Every structure is written in C-alpha cells, then in structure tokens.
Amino acid sequence: MTIQEEFDEPQPLVPGHAPTEATEEEELRAASLRAGLEDFELTEEELTLLEAQFDTEEQDQFGGLPVLAIIGRPNVGKSTLVNRVLGRREAVVQDKPGVTRDRVSYPAEWAGRHFMMVDTGGWEVDVKGLDRSVAEQAELAIEQADAVMFVVDANVGPTSTDERVVQLLRQSGKPVVLVANKVDSDQQEAEAATLWSLGLGQPWPVSALHGRGAGDLLDHVLSVLPEVSAVSAPKPTHGVRRVALLGRPNVGKSSLLNALAGSERVVVNETAGTTRDPVDELVEIDGRAWCFVDTAGIRRRMYKSIGADYYASLRTQAALEKAEVAMVLLDSADELSDQDMRILQQVVDAGRALVIVNNKWDLVDEERQRALRREQERGLVQLQWAPRINVTARTGWHTNRIERALDDALEGWSTRVSTGRLNAFLGELVAANPHPVRGGKQPRILFATQVSSKPPRIVIFTTGFLDPAYRRFIERRLREEFGFVGTPIRLSIRIKEKRRR
C-alpha cells in the first residue's frame, strides 16, 4: 500500500483514547517549539492566537446579544464597514456589486459592549430571481434586528432605491442609524449633508475603507442599541443543550420530537412540509432537560427556494446556528440523496456537533438494511466520526439511544487537547509517516495549538504546503488518538518563512 492510499483509507475509531493533558516533558518540548517560531515571520493575528488564553465558552458568549442589521443598495460599502468594525477582513469584499448574498452574522465589540452585526446583500427595487431572494433576506434581517444601520454612498447621494428603503425602514418601526459612506475628506462632508433629505435624521459621515469617522458612528450606534435584545434568543441556561432536528421533508422530524416528548407537541401529517417555522420544545429525558428545535424540511438549495419555502429555509439555518448539536434524519427506505448530503454538509459548515439518525427502520427489510449500510459506507465516508443510530419515531423504537449519542457528540465537540500533548502526538506521527517530498522539498511541521473548541479548531504552523491527503491523514489520526466523536475539526495551516536577518 502506498502512503497516498494509506492516507485515503478510512481508519476505524478505537475505544479508549489517549489523555488530552500533557506530561511535564511534553509541555517543555512544546514550549521549545513555540520559542522556535520566533525565527519566523508571524502576523499580529497569529501572535494573538498563540498568546490568547483558551476559553471553552468563547463560542457561546454572544447568545442573546442585541442585533444590528446593515442595510443598503449594492456596492455602497456594507461589507467594508463590517470589516472596519470587526477590525479584521472577515466579510468578503470585492469591487463589484452583489458579492454578498446571504445574511451573515458576526459578533462585534465596541467600548466594552458586545453585539451582533448582520451583513446583508444589496437591496434593490423590483428585481427577480436570485436578486429578489437577496433582497428578501435583507428584509428579513430588518425584521430580526434590534436596530438598523442604513448605508448610503455619499458620493452618489440619495437615489429612488434609497427612498424605497426608507419606506421599508419606517414600516419596521426599528431605530435607524443613517451612514454616509465613502466620505474620505472634509470637503466631502458637504455632500453627505444632502442625505438629510431622506428624513432619517443626522447622516453620520464615515470612510469604511480608511476608518474615518467610524468611532463616532459606533458611539452613536451603542446609544440606540438596547442592552438586552428583543429578538435574539438567549443562551441556554441551567445546562439545557439545544438540539436542531434537520432533514428533508417527511423524514419524521416532528414524529421524533413527539416520541421524545411523549405527547403530540407538534403537528404531524403525511403531507410533506407541514412544519414551516422552527418549533422549540423543552423535553425531559431520564430527568434531564433538552431543548429540541423541530425545523422545516429542506427541499432544495436555499437560493432555489421561493415564497414560504424560502423563508422556512432561512429560519431552519438560523435554528441550526443557535443549536449546539444537530440530529439529521434520513429516511431508511430511501436511497441517500444529494439533498441529504447537502444538509449534512450544512451542519459541518456551521461547525455543529452531529448525530445521524436512520428513521423509519420498521419499513426496511434485511436486504434493504444491507443496501443502506453499503450506501452509507460509500456516501458518508467523510463523516465516519458522526454517531449513527437506527430508530422508528412512529413507535418510539430505539429512541432511548438518542441521549447517549447526543452526549458523545457534545463531548467530542467540547474536547480540548493541551498544546504539549498535541505537539508530542504530531511529532511522533510525522516521524513515523513523514510528508511526501514534492518538487525536491519536504514541508516540516513547526508547531501546533488548539485555539478553540465547539468545534475544535487546530492551527498548524508549517514550512510549506501540506497535501490535502496528508491533512486528511492527520485528522484521522487525531480522531483515533483523542476521539473528537461527533464533531467536525477545523485544521488551519499557516505556512511560515524565516525572518530575514
């Protein structure tokens, strides 16, 4: 077997994993490797990652915070302004309109206060197709915000589209901060004054690109944002974990929720798509409280959905982002579909813990069970880390296994490996299985550290590019050694060059 084949061969998870804490010798070795990084060029962001104290709760600290939506025509600089407030290039920016399409949320902080910023696509009048979907997302962002930042290009001045946005904002009744963007000098402030005609009060002149006026703008934003959000769901309290039920229409999500609750909590009907809005239910299982969220069935890609299905898809995505673990239901009687794979990938992309549930097990015979096993071995080869259980929601068969699967996934999602143990493991791994030589060069791993959990994110500093197959090999070995059951792992590779003397 070649090294390449060995990398790509699925590896079984072994019971009983190595401890995640390091010995004194491993800690000393990791400290030595960290000191060696001083010989390489490091960015401010990388220094921050290396020096920051690990906080297992950092992914949860923004729950229930006030929400600020960023609205405006295409190409007025909304995403650039988001990046300016965040202090980093987080939102995608390009010198053409329509780059942002989805609503994207970012945790932000100013003057010691935390809030959520929601970047949106450009809003336009009487558009169709994808552009209309983008506009609808922006409208939904207004509905689900505590305050709105309306961005206008000061160089262009108020347009008929801007006036239509003003009507939309007045109907919402939300506090509005009017931003005159692209004011790069004192001379241009006079142009910003023309925006008083929109009737939204004082326009705040800023240059999102250069940061001019951003501080005064944010001070004013904090004065209109409430201390406690009226729209954002608060963090789960008293240890209650949030579980999102996802899947195609009619796979039995509502039936499963009723089975777990022991009563008819939600409507179940043979017609696919009965559920439209996410339904939160507090369910007690063996004395423990869980918050299950029944979501609308995802029929197709979000941008292809229309009408009620489109808004249902948006709310399903929002429910996933607020959850800690997702249970994706598959219909055991049906073949694994592209839509099933997209939903599973949606969970991975959101960084949530994952449990795969084969529902309607009472409808499949032994031949179908064998076929299903083969289908999932091929189709879910990249998701072997996810716990998989077979249930019949209609009768409640094997639903008692769900709690154990959720606990395993959440434990893997929260796993923290010490820096010393991680570097010791990678040192042994690379010594036994070095990276193949490419173009006469062999990249070397300098140092690694886990910078966050929920999901686990590991940053690896190297002297060169690591082959995708080698990255998959590292991830599989990490799972064998430390578990990480039920959770995606984020591997970030930072290629570094030595400082010039």
Image (tube, rainbow, N blue to C red):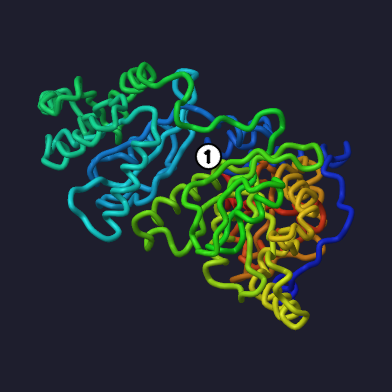
Picture residue at 62% right of the left edge, 61% below the top: 466
Q: Quadrant of the C terminus?
A: top right
Query: In this view of the protein, which residue sits in the foreground, 393 or 71?
Result: 393
Picture residue at 42% right of the left edge, 44% below the top: 104
Query: In this view of the protein, which residue sits in the foreground, 447 or 188?
Result: 188
Q: Position of residue 191 (x, y in %)?
A: 11, 28
Q: Quadrant of the N terminus?
A: bottom right
Q: Position of residue 455 (x, y in %)?
A: 65, 46
Count of numbered badges drawn on the protein: 1
Which quarter of the figure has residue 247?
A: bottom right
Picture residue at 46% right of the left edge, 47% below the top: 315
**Is residue 474 something one can see in this rendering?**
no
Picture residue at 37% right of the left edge, 40% below the top: 141
Q: Secondary structure at mark 1?
A: loop
In this figure, which residue is indicated by the disc labeled 1?
A: 43
Amino acid at circle 1 = Thr
Q: Position of residue 372 (x, y in %)?
A: 70, 76
In the image, taking residue 17 as reference, residue 279 lies left or right, namely left
Look at the picture and state if 15 lies above or below 92: below
**Is residue 199 something one can see in this rendering?**
yes
Look at the picture and state if 458 lies above or below 372: above
Which quarter of the figure has residue 305?
A: bottom left
Badge 1: residue crowd in 10 Å (few <14, some 14–19, many ≥20): few
